[in-house]
Image: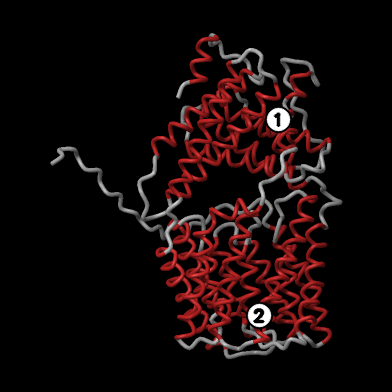
């Protein structure tokens, strides 16, 4: 018998209060809130004037596309919004045709669950969001249970397409006024988080969480800038230089001036000229400064990964979504519900990157919906004053949902719930008590059954993804260390190696965090992850010094090489 002390079993605590804690609102919370109002209002008010408010559900399907892609550059946003509109129309078409061919609720729930799984996988693979698949699933699932005939389908799709085209115009409307607005915001966020991390590091209070958040913000800024890879401009190149400065600050926070980073961030947020980042140690526009963007140009030339290669790791999430949505819908039907799609959509909204986050979303969804039905009961008398009053209440709920959801999902759900209930009244008013009771029951069914399905379908490959991410970091670090130690390394090779290592570190942290939230799996190599991150950050610091982006700290060549290649 072994005398070794057994490793204590970790007791996993399910967060409840923490899941409901409010955060700071998004810097641009008003953009999606105003956009959805501008997209929904004209088609809905036109239908009110024509006396056909019963058709507003179809125009709203297209109008809700205005919620997407607000963080993307306008050149990329145009394509993403177009694909979102097409995806919305595709799901709507499947739902309408299915509804016209059968009224069998079992078949309708199965189709809704499969659509939800496909929408979840594609949105996650393409990183379309927020609000990702939830809006698409809500539209397709709800229309499955609206009686249709095949002859009505083209007209209903035409209404959705027209509203989707209007939503595309609304999403692109700010482009003439601030053509680089999304890139500026992402760059400013990267500079601010880098400054905050540099301050904590210089004060001796370095936090791994703050460092990871800063690296994630810088990575997000690069993703935003590279999304417009086919549309280079002087402004974007200036912003890229600023993001390089943020990266350098993360690699060597002790040699960084946080006040300067914040001043740049404040200047970038405005609409004035992007500040220059010339290093006072060398002439403006010298070869060294121009070399900063060599790695950026190389990365811009690399084509994105094909979609099929990004769908493979999402298979467990897709299976969870299909199973959970189907079971939630069938349980709702067994309880005699008239609208099982509410339970289906509740289940679909739960599934996040891992089980811990899925549990938190379940708590948020239940709390938000329960408070939301109370709000619906309060606004119903006003909404039933007439068609115009109903549309105005829907617009107010749309605005409130997008304004509040950035602080916490449950707070946004408080407005989403009455919005969904008010939409059911577009064809005609229904008993308030019945609507409230059905919504509460379906919310609880969807949350309980959906989470049970998530427990049943585990992601056994999470540990293997961590191992692959560790291998990628080790290889990227060895390459960067070798180039930093080589006297003949070119600026392009150094910059590309540094960028590759920084991206690998971000991916490792995201992969490790996602895997840590999965249950029923073997122990993760947490110590190896921490050591790999520490070694990578030392190598990044050595690389930026080798590039001449920071003054030499006074270490000898031997010391630098030792730090650079340490495991």
**Residue at the farthest left position:** 1
Pointer 2 residue: 143
**How many residues crowd mark 2 within 10 Å: few (<14), some (14–19), many (20+)?**
many
Up/down of 331 relative to 20, above or below: below
Residue 201 x %, y %: 51, 29
| Horizontal relation, residue 433 to residue 188: left or right | left
Up/down of 300 relative to 136, above or below: above
Sequence order check, earlier mark of 1 and 2? 2
Secondary structure category for the residue under label 1: helix
| Residue at image point 73% right, 42% down | 269
Q: Quadrant of the C terminus?
A: top left
| Residue at image point 67% right, 26% down | 495
Pointer 1 residue: 295
Secondary structure category for the residue under label 2: helix
Query: For the residues marked 1 and 2, what is the alpha-carbon distance in whole angstroms?
Result: 48 Å
Name the colouring of the figure: secondary structure
| Residue at image point 74% right, 44% down | 183
Residue 26 x %, y %: 63, 53
| Residue at image point 72% right, 39% down | 302
Instruction: Looking at the picture, tell me which residue is in the foreground, 379 or 343.
Output: 343
Contact check, label 1 and label 2, Cβ < 8 Å: no
Instruction: Looking at the picture, tell me which residue is in the foreground, 117 or 61.
Output: 117
């Amino acid at each position: 018998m072994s005398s070794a002390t057994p490793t204590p079993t970790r007791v996993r605590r399910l967060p409840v209060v923490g899941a409901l804690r409010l955060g700071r609102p998004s810097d641009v919370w008003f953009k999606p809130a105003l956009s959805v109002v501008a997209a929904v209002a004209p088609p809905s008010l036109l239908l009110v004037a024509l006396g056909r408010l019963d058709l507003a559900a179809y125009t709203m399907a297209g109008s809700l596309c205005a919620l997407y892609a607000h963080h993307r550059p306008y050149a990329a946003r145009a394509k993403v919004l177009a694909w979102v509109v097409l995806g919305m129309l595709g799901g709507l078409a499947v739902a309408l045709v299915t509804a016209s061919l059968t009224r069998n609720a079992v078949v309708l729930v199965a189709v809704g669950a499969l659509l939800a799984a496909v929408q979840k996988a594609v949105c996650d693979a393409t990183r379309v969001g927020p609000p990702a698949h939830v809006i698409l699933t809500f539209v397709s699932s709800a229309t499955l249970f609206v009686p249709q005939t095949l002859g009505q389908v083209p007209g209903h799709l035409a209404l959705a397409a027209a509203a989707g085209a209007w939503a595309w115009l609304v999403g692109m409307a700010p482009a003439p006024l601030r053509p680089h607005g999304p890139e500026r915001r992402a760059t400013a966020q990267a500079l601010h988080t880098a400054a905050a991390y540099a301050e904590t590091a210089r004060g001796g209070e370095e936090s791994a969480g703050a460092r990871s958040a800063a690296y994630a913000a810088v990575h997000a800024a690069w993703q935003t800038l590279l999304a417009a890879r086919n549309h280079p401009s002087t402004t974007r190149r200036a912003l890229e230089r600023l993001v390089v400065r943020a990266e350098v600050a993360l690699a060597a926070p002790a040699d960084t001036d946080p006040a300067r980073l914040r001043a740049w961030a404040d200047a970038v947020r405005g609409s004035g000229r992007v500040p220059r980042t010339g290093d006072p140690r060398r002439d403006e526009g010298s070869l060294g400064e121009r070399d900063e963007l060599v790695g950026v140009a190389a990365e811009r030339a690399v084509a994105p990964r094909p979609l099929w290669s990004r769908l493979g790791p999402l298979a467990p999430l897709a299976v969870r979504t299909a199973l959970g949505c189907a079971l939630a819908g069938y349980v709702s039907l067994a309880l005699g519900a008239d609208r099982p799609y509410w339970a289906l959509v509740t289940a679909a909204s739960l599934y996040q990157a891992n089980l811990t986050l899925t549990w938190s979303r379940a708590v948020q969804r239940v709390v938000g919906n329960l408070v939301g039905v109370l709000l619906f009961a309060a606004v119903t008398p006003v909404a039933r004053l007439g068609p115009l009053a109903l549309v105005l209440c829907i617009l107010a709920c749309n605005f409130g949902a997008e304004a509040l959801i950035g602080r916490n999902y449950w707070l946004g759900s408080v407005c989403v719930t009455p919005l969904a209930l008010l939409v059911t009244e577009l064809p005609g008013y229904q008993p308030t008590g019945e609507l409230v009771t059905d919504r509460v029951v379906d919310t609880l069914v969807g949350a309980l059954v959906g989470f049970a399905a998530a427990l049943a379908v585990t992601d056994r490959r999470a540990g293997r993804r961590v191992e692959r991410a560790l291998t990628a970091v080790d290889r990227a670090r060895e390459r960067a260390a070798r180039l930093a130690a080589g006297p003949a390394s070119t600026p392009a090779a150094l910059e590309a190696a540094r960028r590759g290592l920084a991206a690998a570190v971000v991916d490792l942290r995201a992969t490790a965090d996602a895997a840590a939230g999965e249950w029923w799996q073997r122990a993760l190599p947490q110590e190896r992850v921490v050591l790999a991150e520490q070694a990578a950050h030392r190598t990044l610091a050595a690389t930026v010094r080798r590039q001449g982006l920071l003054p030499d700290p006074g270490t000898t060549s031997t010391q630098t090489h030792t730090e650079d290649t340490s495991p």
